[in-house]
């Protein structure tokens, strides 16, 4: 029997509760599909940081690098200054393991309400591929106090060859700047992954997202790379959408989209919109993928600390992410069984959490899906 060693970082807030149900469902499907899972639990998160001052040590990262996947709950706690846990745990994992692909299925399941009037599951079913390690998330930036802003503006002019047309040096008390970066290699690999995914799924259109009409240097390069990669896939239609436009079209005509590929910042924004049109963060799974290294699977929602310990959170996004994780490991039938069980439980409508209009507990939803995966689907 095949055994998979799967590290778990349950994290903060509702993270441990939803991860517990994800593990329960995976344990159930492993019995049916005849494989075994050895869970390796790690303590990293707010409680651990407050107690020890430690975020994610190097020795833990080396241990995690021996595994193909990581199962993540949620990170974030109001007791810790914003950004510390997110940068020190989530982003460090993504960058350390070069998880350059963020994959987000945007799929409306039957019997799940969408805020878009008259749209059905047949209208909302696409995948967003987000570049995950470049753009404005590289962490290069800073603040400049009064008296030094002129130097900052001169640097900006020399770097970007822009004429700002204003003089803030006399009255600006403080200025802040953030630098984005897109490399040809970084863009090429994620764009190619998007085309390969479209080919694998039998899709015939890939949409590229950018803001090249304003940020022409960075996103002009992104467009050039997209056009170059597209030449290798003559049977797949391509199109460009500006990020502001695509937020409009996601709401007006979501059925037009099949595979969408976006730089990091814009991908971050549009996938939250995608989560809303598919019924909310509680049914929105995500994956951070390095095809040749260690990948990480998680719900895209936050830690929701105010619901911690209430057994109220929706675990479906985490359970679904667990199914994606099994597919990544090669257990495709198990993954399909989990997704089918989720669909059936939601369609039956007997068990659903508060965010989906019900009153069921987190554990009750997990229990229902775990039982369903062991039944004759």
Image (cartoon, rainbow, N blue to C red):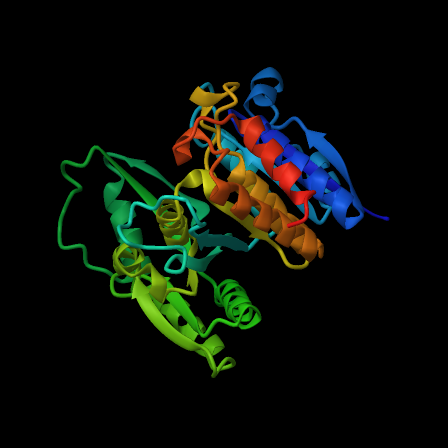
User: Would residue 123 appear left or right of 183 to someone viewing this image?
Assistant: left
Residue 249, by quadrant, is bottom left
Residue shown at the point (32%, 55%) measured from the top left: 119
Above or below — where is 357 with respect to 155?
above
For this rendering, which residue is in front, 105 or 295? Answer: 105
Residue shown at the point (53%, 41%) measured from the top left: 345
Residue shown at the point (56%, 42%) measured from the top left: 298
Q: Position of residue 224 (x, y in %)?
A: 40, 74
Q: Position of residue 102 (x, y in %)?
A: 51, 53
Above or below — where is 155 with respect to 352?
below
User: Would residue 188 appear left or right of 147 to someone viewing this image?
Assistant: right
Most extreme residue toward the right is 1
Above or below — where is 325 with respect to 349?
below
For this rendering, which residue is in front, 120 or 40? Answer: 120
For this rendering, which residue is in front, 360 or 26? Answer: 360
Q: Is residue 219 visible?
A: no
User: Would residue 105 appear left or right of 334 to someone viewing this image?
Assistant: left
Q: Is residue 372 visible?
A: yes
For this rendering, which residue is in front, 291 or 317? Answer: 317
Q: Position of residue 260 (x, y in %)?
A: 42, 62
Residue shown at the point (72%, 45%) measured from the top left: 65
């Amino acid at each position: 029997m095949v055994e998979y060693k799967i590290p778990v970082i349950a994290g903060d807030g509702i993270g441990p509760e939803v991860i517990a149900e994800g593990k329960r469902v995976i344990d159930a499907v492993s019995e049916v599909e005849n494989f075994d899972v050895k869970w390796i639990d790690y303590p990293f998160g707010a409680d651990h940081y407050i107690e020890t001052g430690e975020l994610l040590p190097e020795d833990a990262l080396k241990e995690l690098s021996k595994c193909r996947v990581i199962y993540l709950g949620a990170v974030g706690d109001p007791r810790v200054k914003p950004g510390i846990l997110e940068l020190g745990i989530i982003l460090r994992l993504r960058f350390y393991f070069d998880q350059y692909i963020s994959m987000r299925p945007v799929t409306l399941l039957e019997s799940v309400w969408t805020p878009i009037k008259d749209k059905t599951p047949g209208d909302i079913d696409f995948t967003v591929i987000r570049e995950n390690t470049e753009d404005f998330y590289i962490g290069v930036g800073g603040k400049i106090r009064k008296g030094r802003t002129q130097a900052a503006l001169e640097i900006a002019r020399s770097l970007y060859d822009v004429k700002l047309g204003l003089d803030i040096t006399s009255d600006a008390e403080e200025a802040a700047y953030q630098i984005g970066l897109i490399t040809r290699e970084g863009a090429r690999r994620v764009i190619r992954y998007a085309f390969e995914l479209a080919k694998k799924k039998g899709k015939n259109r890939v949409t590229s997202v950018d803001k090249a009409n304003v940020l022409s240097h960075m996103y002009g390069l992104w467009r050039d790379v997209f056009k170059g990669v597209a030449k290798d896939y003559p049977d797949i239609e391509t199109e460009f959408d500006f990020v502001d436009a695509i937020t409009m079209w996601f709401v007006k005509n979501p059925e037009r989209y099949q595979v969408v590929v976006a730089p990091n910042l814009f991908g971050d924004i549009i996938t939250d919109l995608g989560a809303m049109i598919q019924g909310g963060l509680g049914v929105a799974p995500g994956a951070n993928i390095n095809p040749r290294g260690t990948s990480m699977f998680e719900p895209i929602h936050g830690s929701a600390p105010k619901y911690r310990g209430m057994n109220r959170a929706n675990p479906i996004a985490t359970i679904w992410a667990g199914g994606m994780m099994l597919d990544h490991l090669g257990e495709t039938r198990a993954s399909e069984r989990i997704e089918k069980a989720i669909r059936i439980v939601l369609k039956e409508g007997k068990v659903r959490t508060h965010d989906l209009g019900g009153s069921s507990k987190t554990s009750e939803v997990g229990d229902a899906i775990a039982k369903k995966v062991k039944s004759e689907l």
